[in-house]
Amino acid sequence: MKAILYLVSITLCSSLALSACQTAPKLAIDNIVTAPMPILMVSLDSDGDGYSDEIDLCPGTPRNIVTDERGCPFTGMGIGLKMEYRAFFAKGSSELSKEYQLELDTVALKLQEYYTATMRIEGHASVDEMSDTKLRPNSLARNRALIVKNYLVLKHKIDPERLNTFNYDAEQPITSSDTEEGKSMNRRVYGVATADFDSEEEMSMNRRIFEIAVEPED
């Protein structure tokens, strides 16, 4: 009899436990809050002057032209011209590729337009070029600067007195030389052409002289 009562007790407890499991409240899945995924808006800058097309008042500004807060070429008093130039070279080479010759042609036109403008031309080399004695590093950076100067003088008849070259070897890298990409970025020439004007009259005179100089002959 005791055994029967014991079995009935176990069965009753098991039933109650199972019933409790089946009637347990479900997780409130409906109460889970999900955060929306952020949407990244990309502003298009077609001419690469640092001003998005939405606010750029001068779309299509040429490369290497310094712009003002409107995205237009800077022509304020004090600076009549400020134009940057960059060229990169193969390891151990001072040969100016066609791409950088074409960009230098644009610089030459500005130097002709602004007859008082001067240009600073810096030659640079990478660390691995400096460590390779076969590449004669002491003259490589200098030759890179000179090849740019000679191109302007010989092809575009720019007065050499307006062109100042500087040799920095590997002393002023623009990025780490730990990678091949970094080394190639440091094998470069950096140039900046500037012309200062003190008044609107001086700027206008500069432009008139340029127009007379390029006026076609009858």
Image (cartoon, grey):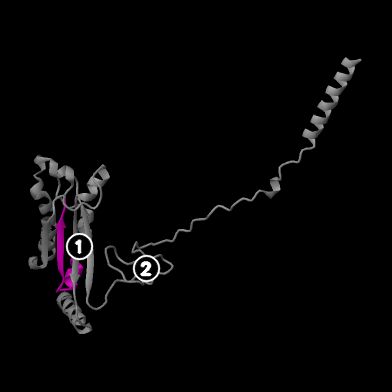
Frontmost residue, 42 versus 9: 9
Frontmost residue, 217 versus 57: 57
Say whether residue 114 is visible: yes
10 Å crowding of disc 2: few (<14), some (14-19), many (20+): some
Residue at the front extreme, as displayed: 2
Counting from the top left corner in percent of width and height, residue 138 is at 8, 48
Query: Is residue 34 within the magenta segment?
Result: no
- Which corner quadrant of the image does residue 162 belong to? bottom left
Counting from the top left corner in percent of width and height, residue 20 is at 79, 34
Residues shaded magenta: 108-124
Give the residue type that dot 2 points to: Pro
Residue at the right extreme, as displayed: 1
Residue labelled with disc 1 = 105
Position of the N terminus, as image quadrant, is: top right
Q: What residue sits 49% from the left and 56% below the top? A: 40
Residue at the bottom extreme, as displayed: 201
Front tag of 2 and 1: 2
Q: What residue sits 27% from the left and 75% below the top? A: 75
Counting from the top left corner in percent of width and height, residue 18 is at 80, 30
Give the residue type that dot 1 points to: Asp
- Which corner quadrant of the image does residue 83 belong to? bottom left
Q: Is residue 9 above or below residue 139?
A: above
Say whether residue 215 is visible: no
Structural distance between the alpha carbons of marks 2 and 1:
22 Å
Residue labelled with disc 2 = 59
